[in-house]
Image (cartoon, rainbow, N blue to C red):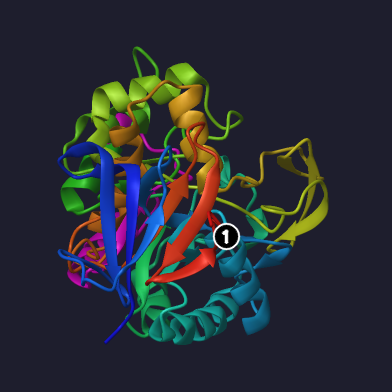
């Protein structure tokens, strides 16, 4: 019989609300409904127990990226696991189609092994007007044939593609992605409000890092932000690191979209979990100072150094969001978007034993993935 652990005494955040002095029963790799008489009891009084975090948009960490080789990918995955991200989608950066196809082949193998949850292609089908930290020479219109080439290279493991849907071929590419069960995300876009509505009607369901790399919300030209916030079919990504968004923008997104349509992401690059210094994001050189990553040439923000445990703590202690809403944004909502909510995203019997233990001040103390401690809280 698999060993049984009972984590008892914490405030446990469930889909129905927070249970004070609650417990979570772990049997083998899963959460169980009942405990055996010989179960090990672990006292976690004074802590919070929340589901493992799910990151939809992440380029790397620990000094490594998802461009490969395999050891680098696994190093980046491990870095984020140690910060509570038990499920991660690996994001690419704009490059030649053949290069991205090779990268997708490597990542698809790791997805098949369960190391990552799939692949997100961010670029090259984005607007040169809103390129951010992507090489403008490598950008191109979203030709459905090229999009299909990347999907084929991913061997069924592509989860999401970010597109500037206003570009030639954009809407046809959105329809292609929808037909193949891949999320079409509107991002790095110069679209108007009307063009964004058209993309959503064609099947786009995610806003890639809302507010960033798109026109600002205007009172005469509301642009993509208004269209993405108002449509119930769209989940909006937010980077809650204190740099990418003003707190008022975060509050606006939560108030307009509602907690059920927000997904916190890291958009992390190599420096996450490491510190300041010089790094590469794709072919571009990045300087990280005081935790903020910017391109050496031009100064554009170049992803983040965020980890999701920091996003959690900031959301609760600085933004004053309810813990239950933050858990939804970090776990339940992205799990549902990925179609994995039957296995992850909440602390319910039968689901994977993926959980994060936080202290009373919301600092990370322990991480469990599939019943095994990644970060052992060593509570005695």
User: What residue is drawn where x is 58% and y is 62%?
Assistant: 93
**Depicted 22 relative to depicted 120: above or below:** above
Along the line of sight, the residue nearer the viewer: 249 or 296:
249
- Residue at mark 1: 82
Tell me the quarter of the picture where residue 326 sits. top left
Q: Residue furthest top?
A: 219
Image spot of residue 27 (x, y percent) = 28, 73
User: What residue is drawn where x is 27% and y is 51%?
Assistant: 23
Q: How many marks?
A: 1
**Depicted 190 relative to depicted 141: above or below:** above
Along the line of sight, the residue nearer the viewer: 303 or 34:
34
Along the horizontal axis of the image, is 137 left or right of 195? right
Specify the quadrant that holds the N terminus: bottom left
Residue 174 in view (yes/no): yes
User: What residue is drawn where x is 49% and y is 24%?
Assistant: 317
Q: Residue furthest front?
A: 37
**Depicted 218 relative to depicted 315: above or below:** above
Residue 345 in view (yes/no): no
User: What residue is drawn where x is 35% and y is 43%?
Assistant: 10
Image spot of residue 114 (x, y percent) = 41, 80
Give the class, few, some or many, for how many residues have Cα within 10 Å of label 1's Cα (few <14, many ≥20): many
Helix, strand or loop at disc 1?
Answer: loop
* Magenta span includes 186: yes
Image spot of residue 2 (x, y percent) = 30, 83
* Magenta span includes 118: no
Chain part drawn in magenta? 167-194
**Depicted 370 relative to depicted 212: above or below:** below
Along the horizontal axis of the image, is 315 left or right of 93? left
């Amino acid at each position: 019989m698999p060993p049984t652990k009972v984590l008892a005494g914490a405030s446990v955040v469930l889909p129905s609300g927070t249970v004070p002095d609650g417990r979570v029963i772990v049997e083998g790799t899963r959460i169980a409904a009942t405990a055996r008489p010989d179960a090990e009891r672990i006292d976690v009084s004074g802590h919070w127990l929340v589901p493992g975090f799910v990151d939809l948009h992440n380029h790397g960490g620990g000094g490594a990226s998802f461009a490969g080789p395999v050891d680098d990918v696994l190093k980046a995955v491990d870095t984020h696991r140690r910060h509570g991200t038990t499920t991660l989608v690996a994001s690419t950066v704009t490059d030649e189609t053949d290069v991205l196809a090779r990268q997708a082949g490597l990542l698809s193998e790791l997805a098949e092994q369960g190391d990552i949850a799939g692949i997100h292609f961010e670029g090259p089908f984005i607007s040169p007007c809103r390129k951010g930290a992507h090489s403008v020479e490598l950008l191109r219109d979203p030709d459905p044939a090229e999009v299909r080439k990347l999907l084929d290279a991913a061997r069924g493991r592509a989860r999401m593609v970010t597109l500037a849907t206003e570009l030639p071929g954009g809407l046809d590419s959105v329809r292609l992605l929808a037909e193949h069960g891949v999320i079409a995300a509107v991002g790095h876009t110069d679209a108007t409000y009307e063009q964004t509505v058209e993309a959503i009607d064609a099947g786009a369901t995610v806003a890639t890092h809302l507010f960033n790399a798109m026109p600002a919300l205007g009172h005469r030209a509301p642009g993509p932000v208004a269209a993405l916030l108002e449509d119930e079919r769209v989940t909006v990504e937010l980077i809650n690191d204190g740099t990418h968004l003003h707190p008022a923008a975060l509050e606006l997104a939560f108030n307009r979209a509602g907690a059920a349509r927000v997904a916190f992401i890291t958009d992390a690059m190599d420096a996450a979990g490491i510190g300041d210094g010089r790094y590469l994001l794709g072919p571009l050189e990045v300087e990280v100072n005081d935790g903020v990553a910017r391109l050496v040439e031009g100064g554009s923000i170049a992803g983040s150094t965020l980890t999701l445990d920091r996003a959690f703590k900031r959301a609760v202690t600085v933004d004053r969001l309810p813990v239950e809403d933050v858990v939804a944004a970090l776990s339940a909502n992205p799990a549902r978007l990925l179609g994995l909510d039957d296995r992850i995203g909440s602390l319910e019997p039968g689901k994977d034993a993926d959980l994060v233990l936080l202290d009373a001040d919301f600092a990370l103390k322990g991480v469990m993935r599939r019943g095994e401690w990644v970060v052992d809280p060593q509570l005695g």
